[in-house]
Amino acid sequence: MPYFFRVKITGWTASFRYPIFVYGYQPTLPVPPYSTVYGLISAAAGKVVTPEDLEVKYVFRSAAKGVDLETIYEWKVGGITKTNVIKREFLFNPELYLYIKEEEIVNCFRKPHYPLLLGRSTELAFVEEIKKVNLVQKENFKVGGIILPFPPIRPLNGIIQALPTHFSNTFPRKSIGTRPWFLIKDFQNYKGKGWVDEEMGWGIIIEEEKDE
């Protein structure tokens, strides 16, 4: 029975940008990409943390989605050249549950080195709870608020999006590990094997199926 530390991170709003939308209406991804999660962990740790350093699982949910008006200022040397107003989607009352085994990294969330964000620099987040939990192996359970490699092992409802796992620590930053991912927002039944957080009632790890 594997154990994890479950770190609950909450905020007022969150938004996760689609890489392909640069101008105009700005929709939000329904769940954060791995690059956002590893950026969050790096902020807490005070150093760059990548998938090579740490494996993390997570579940994300929010209460609602809204649209806000945002003023964009275009600037060049000498001052602002013009402004533009765009519509930007945001998620209300976000909750992010990180599942991490490494206690050293978990302890960084007790006193983060840098501010924690769930999206843009204005979307501050805070740690609400850190708890050690055991996962139970089950068949047929609920999954939602997660991101899986595409294609998924079994049919599920979600969206496909090419996303990086993290970014380089250079200027300008470079996206690393970009590949298709399957984003699952709504909770749904998964008819397979995996590891479940019984307290929360959702699956965390979906096991690979082996050919007979």
Image: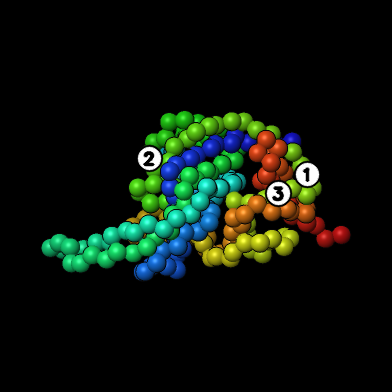
Q: Which numbered circle lies on residue 36?
A: none
Q: Amino acid at mark 3?
A: Lys
The answer to whether one can see residue 175 in this image is no
Is residue 92 shown left or right of residue 60? left
Q: CA distance from mark 2 to mark 3?
A: 32 Å
Residue at image mark 1: 138
Residue at 59% in and 64% down: 159
In the depicted view, which residue is nearer to us: 133 or 53? 133
Residue at 44% in and 37% down: 126
Residue 151 locus on image (x, y percent)? 67, 64
Within 10 angstroms of label 3, few (less than 14), some, or many (20 or more) residues?
Answer: some
The answer to whether one can see residue 64 in this image is yes
Is residue 203 shown left or right of residue 11? right
Within 10 angstroms of label 1, few (less than 14), some, or many (20 or more) residues?
Answer: some
SS for callout 1 = strand
Is residue 203 shown left or right of residue 109? right
Residue 184 locus on image (x, y percent)? 61, 57
Quarter of the view holding residue 99: top right
Residue at image mark 2: 115
Quarter of the view holding residue 152: bottom right
Q: Quadrant of the N terminus?
A: top right
In the depicted view, which residue is nearer to us: 24 or 211? 24
Q: CA distance from mark 2 to mark 1?
A: 37 Å
Q: Nearer the viewer, mark 1 or mark 3?
A: 3
Residue 81 locus on image (x, y percent)? 18, 67
Q: Amino acid at mark 1?
A: Lys
Residue at 53% in and 32% down: 129
Q: CA distance from mark 1 to mark 3?
A: 11 Å
Residue at image mark 3: 142
